[in-house]
Every structure is written in structure tokens, then in C-alpha cells.
Image (cartoon, helix red, strand yellow):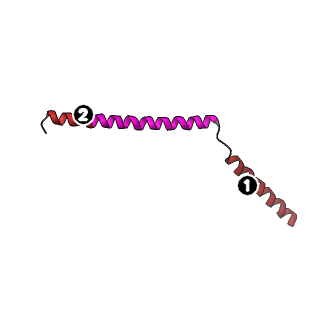
Amino acid sequence: MSTYKLKTFLFLAALLFFSTAQSTRPLSRATLESQEEANLDKACEEECLMRRTLIAHTDYIYTQEKHGR
């Protein structure tokens, strides 16, 4: 009976070890490139939003000056 428990315990320990070893493997080159591309896209979106906001504020300021407010 104790041999059965020992085998079960060793099997579960090995399964746990291999599952954690697989999850901590380094990322592939394609995964890293896609993450970098996503970060670049996000940075470009933020930069575009800042430029549009600045243009809108500048336009608002000049429009208010022309209308005498």
C-alpha cells in the first residue's frame, strides 16, 4: 500500500516539476517581436492622441481670439 502512495506522490511531483519548467521557458523570438510591435503601436497611438489634442487646443485658442472672447 505504501508503494502505491509513493509512486503516486512521485508521479504528481514530476508532473508539477515539468509543468512549471515548461511555463518558465524563455519566450520565442516571434513572441518578443509581436510584443515589441504592440508596444510600438500603443506608443504611436498615444503620440497621435497628444498631437491631435495639442492641435485642437491651439485651434480653440486662435478661434477664441478671432471672435473677441
Number of marks present in the image shown: 2
Q: Within 10 angstroms of label 1, few (less than 14), some, or many (20 or more) residues? A: few
Judging depth in this view, the residue of 22 and 54 nearest the camera is 54
Q: Is residue 16 above or below residue 63?
A: below
Judging depth in this view, the residue of 59 and 5 nearest the camera is 59
Q: Is residue 31 left or right of residue 48?
A: right
Confirm whether residue 1 shows in the render.
no
Q: Within 10 angstroms of label 2, few (less than 14), some, or many (20 or more) residues? A: few
- Mark 1 belongs to which amino acid? Leu
Query: Which of the labelled discs sits on residue 16, or is there none?
Result: 1
- Mark 2 belongs to which amino acid? Asp
x, y percent for residue 3? 87, 63
**The image quarter in which residue 46 lies:** top left
Residue sitting at the far left: 68
Q: Which residues are magenta?
A: 29-56
**The image quarter in which residue 5 lies:** bottom right
x, y percent for residue 44? 44, 34
**How far is the residue under mark 2 from the one under mark 1?**
61 Å
Q: Residue at x 71, y 50 (%)?
A: 19
Q: Which secondary structure lies at badge 2?
A: helix
Q: Residue at x 66, y 42 (%)?
A: 26
Identify the residue position indicated by label 2 in the image: 59
Q: Residue at x 78, y 54 (%)?
A: 14
Quarter of the picture containing the N terminus is bottom right
Q: Is residue 19 above or below residue 9?
A: above
